[in-house]
Image (cartoon, helix red, strand yellow):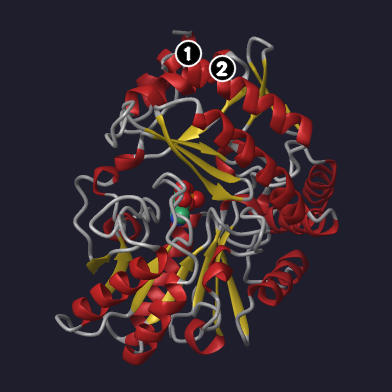
Amino acid sequence: MNDLYDRHRAVLPDWLALYYDSPLEITHGEGRHVWDSEGRRYLDFFGGILTTMTAHALPEVTKAVSEQAGRIIHSSTLYLNRPMVELAERIAQLSGIPDARVFFTTSGTEANDTALLLATTHRRSNTILAMRNSYHGRSFSAIGITGNRSWSPSSLSPLQTLYVHGGVRTRGPFAHLSDAEFIAACVEDLRDLLGHTRPPAALIAEPIQGVGGFTSPPDGLYAAFRDVLNEHGILWIADEVQTGWGRTGEHFWGWQAHGENGPPDIVTFAKGIGNGMSIGGVVARAEIMNCLDANSISTFGGTQITMAAGLANLNHLIEHDLQGNARRVGGLLIERLRAVAAQLPGVREVRGRGLMIGVELARPGTDEADPRAAAAVLEAAREGGLLIGKGGGHSTSALRIAPPLSLTVAEAEEGAAILERALHSAY
Ligand code: PLP
């Protein structure tokens, strides 16, 4: 253990999660690589924590941030702020939500908190539908509705939360069903649940569960839910904190895989939009966004320096079609990892889309989760020069791969080869 680790442990709480037996101190990054304090270079297959959306040290973002810092960093959102208005215009337009309004926060947690506040106020109900195995952040209300219990063992939610089946396709009572049957069973379960409760304000769901190990339902589940929600006047909140901005390759937003019945009422976002700068936010129809009668700002939400970074990052993402790159390179990577998995009985599934790829490990020959193997693979990959993530709470047997969307084919090949060696060493 190094000196910084001891100092870290002395001043920060024990529940702060760290990867690795001997955690890395990251000092700098460029493109898809980061370096540690001993000068070792790593291919970053976790993009920070899905935060480095385009690339580390992207010149356009660095320039926008330093130019903005030279003018003004923050003047409070009580005044007009050009980068904030311009980024809000872009996001409103990209959201697919009619008559959209945008409110900026500084994290995904706060974005979800705001969405819950809006939904409960608008619908005059403090009951929320959430998905089993979900994760929505660590504030009192966001962790309180989070479905992944072992992630939030001691929270007492201020909201009444009812948990719905469907966020995970591969586990639970409906796992053996075909896609169409799975959707029908989840819809029936939702209808049944609604028959036993006062009308909830909203359903909140990650289109692909992030902390839950990059698991997702069949396409169309949330469109089918939408019909039921509409019958009861229940809002649909899509938590796009991990799935937004083209990460899933096929779609700009994760909800678009479920979009036949129109966009969600509320979309929350964070992580990748700032390429590491703290931007979160909510997009919703004006009638929902304007339902609060409190006149309120977020002190640091929408501040000039983060908005300048977000604009430069979003422009780069779209001009260079990084969504298309995620589809192409992610597709190759999934194919390559499935070929590796076919030779290893401990790899139960390689799943995902675009550059959001989950590798589920199980004790060879069984369906039993294998978190120890996942931890060993993480260590071995790090030794080989590759950083990946793993799921949290109940999903620690899932490896998570989410590199910056500019990943090249050569880097995908290199990372897959390191991961293949790491998987072999763990089994
Ligand atoms: N929602 C989802 C889907 C997340 O994955 C996370 C964080 O991992 C959050 C919300 C919370 O975001 P933050 O950590 O920025 O508060």
| Residues marked 1 and 2 touching at CB (< 8 Å) | yes
Residue 27 visible:
no
| Total numbered labels | 2
Of residues 357 and 28, the one drawn nearer to the viewer in this rendering: 357
Asked if residue 212 is positioned above or below residue 196 in the image, the reply reads: above
Q: Which mark is residue 361?
A: none
What residue did someone put label 2 on?
421
Structural crowding at the residue carrying mark 1, measured as other residues with C-alpha within 10 Å and reported as few (<14), some (14–19) or many (≥20):
few
Q: Is residue 227 left or right of residue 385?
A: left
Of residues 390 and 119, the one drawn nearer to the viewer in this rendering: 390
Asked if residue 99 is positioned above or below residue 238 in the image, the reply reads: below
Mark 2 Cβ and ligand 1 under 8 Å apart: no
Residue under the point 64% across and 30% down: 44
Q: Quadrant of residue 6?
A: top left
Asked if residue 327 is positioned above or below residue 302 in the image, the reply reads: above
What residue did someone put label 1 on?
425
Residue type at numbered disc 2:
Arg
**Which secondary structure, mark 1?**
helix
Residue type at numbered disc 1:
Ser
